[in-house]
Image: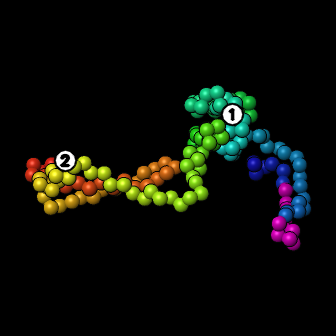
Amino acid sequence: LDDSCKWRIHASLTPDNKTFMVKTLKYKHTCIRPAYVNKVSAKWIANKLGRKINVDPDMKYDLMENFLTSEYGVKPPQWQMYRARQFSREQIEGNHAKNDECNELPVFKRIFVCLHAMEIGFLKGCRPFIGFDRCHLKGPFGGVLLVAVSVDGNDCLF
């Protein structure tokens, strides 16, 4: 709002601390409305673009922005449109993480993979030094990938 605008509202919390009571309200606006509003939620965008995203799940952000600007006068940021597209895809395809859930306790914890030739080469040709490195996996499932390496006789990683 512009400081010179006459529109005002004064409200206070009621004794039940759950609702507000409007004390005074001046309806008259003297300021002009902004050209674009960018305070919209991803769910709202997904509802407005639902059929378009169903037809084209990889809809470009420029097309989404042009449609929302021309039809509704809103110009959301790109990250909001990304979330809306993800939300809409989740409505169509379902949530992959929730689809893999079951009522039983999970059993799988870790896995170790070592080929026999690698084991022999490691034991016979490497120095007694082992280096560890980890990589945190992103995405709906997460986890940590742990790698063990050593140095062979040619000063190369094995």
Q: Is residue 84 visible?
A: no
Q: Mark 2 sits on what residue?
A: 117
Kindly state the secondary structure of the residue where label 1 is placed.
loop
Question: What segment carries the magenta color?
Answer: 9-18
> Mark 1: few, some, or many residues within 10 Å (few <14, many ≥20)?
some
Q: Nearer the viewer, mark 1 or mark 2?
A: 2
Seen at 72% across and 38% down, the residue is 47
> Mark 2: few, some, or many residues within 10 Å (few <14, many ≥20)?
few
Residue 32's x, y, as percent?
Answer: 78, 40
Q: Mark 1 sits on what residue?
A: 49
Residue 104's x, y, as percent?
Answer: 56, 58
Seen at 57% across and 31% down, the residue is 58
Residue 157 falls left or right of residue 112: left
What is the image's colouring?
rainbow
Q: Amino acid at mark 1?
A: Leu
Seen at 85% across and 64% down, the residue is 19
Q: Amino acid at mark 2?
A: Ala
Residue 6's x, y, as percent?
Answer: 84, 50
Q: Quick check: is 14 in the magenta stretch? A: yes
Residue 155's x, y, as percent?
Answer: 12, 51
Query: Front-most of 9 and 16?
Result: 16
How many numbered markers are drawn?
2
The earlier-in-sequence mark between 1 and 2 is: 1
Seen at 66% across and 44% down, the residue is 42
Depicted 57 relative to depicted 131: above or below: above
